[in-house]
Image (tube, rainbow, N blue to C red):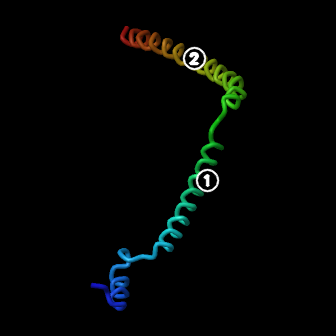
Amino acid sequence: MPFAPGAAIFLKKRFPLLLFDDSKKLEKALVEEAVIAHVFERADEKWRQDLAAKADLERGLPATKTELRAEIANAKHDILRWMAGGFIAQTALPVAVLAFFR
C-alpha cells in the first residue's frame, strides 16, 4: 500500500535520518572527506617539518660533544672540590672533639 504524499512529509520531519536524498548525502560525504583529507595533509606536513634528518643531527653533534665534555670536566672539578671539603671536615670534627675533652 503506497504512502500518501502527506505521510512522506510527516515521516521526513519526524525521522529526518531515515529519509534522505542520496545526492545530498553523497555531496555531504564528499565535503566531509575533503575536509578530513585536508586535516591529515596539514598534520603530515607538520610532522615532516618536525623530523630531523640524520645529516641535521650529525651537523650539531660535534658542538654537542664539545659542550658535554666541558660540562663533564666542570662537574668533575665540583665533585673533587666537595669531596676534599668533606674529607677535611671529617678529619677536623674528631680532632676538635678530642681537643675539647682533653
Dot 1 alpha-carbon crowd within 10 angstroms: few under 14, some 14 to 19, many 20 or more: few
Q: Residue furthest left?
A: 1
Label placed on residue 81: 2
Q: Secondary structure at mark 1?
A: helix
User: Disc 1 residue type?
Assistant: Arg
Q: The C terminus appears in which quarter of the rendering? A: top left
Image coordinates for residue 37, horizontal then vertical, percent? 57, 56
Q: Nearer the viewer, mark 2 or mark 1?
A: 1
Seen at 65% across and 43% down, the residue is 49
The image shows residue 90 at horizontal and vertical percentages of 44, 13
Earlier-in-chain disc, 2 versus 1: 1
Task: Check disc 2 and report its element: helix, strand or loop.
Answer: helix
Q: Position of residue 43 (x, y in %)?
A: 58, 50
Q: Position of residue 52 (x, y in %)?
A: 65, 35
Q: Determine whether 89 is above or below 9 in the image.
A: above
Give the CA distance from mark 2 to mark 1.
Answer: 54 Å
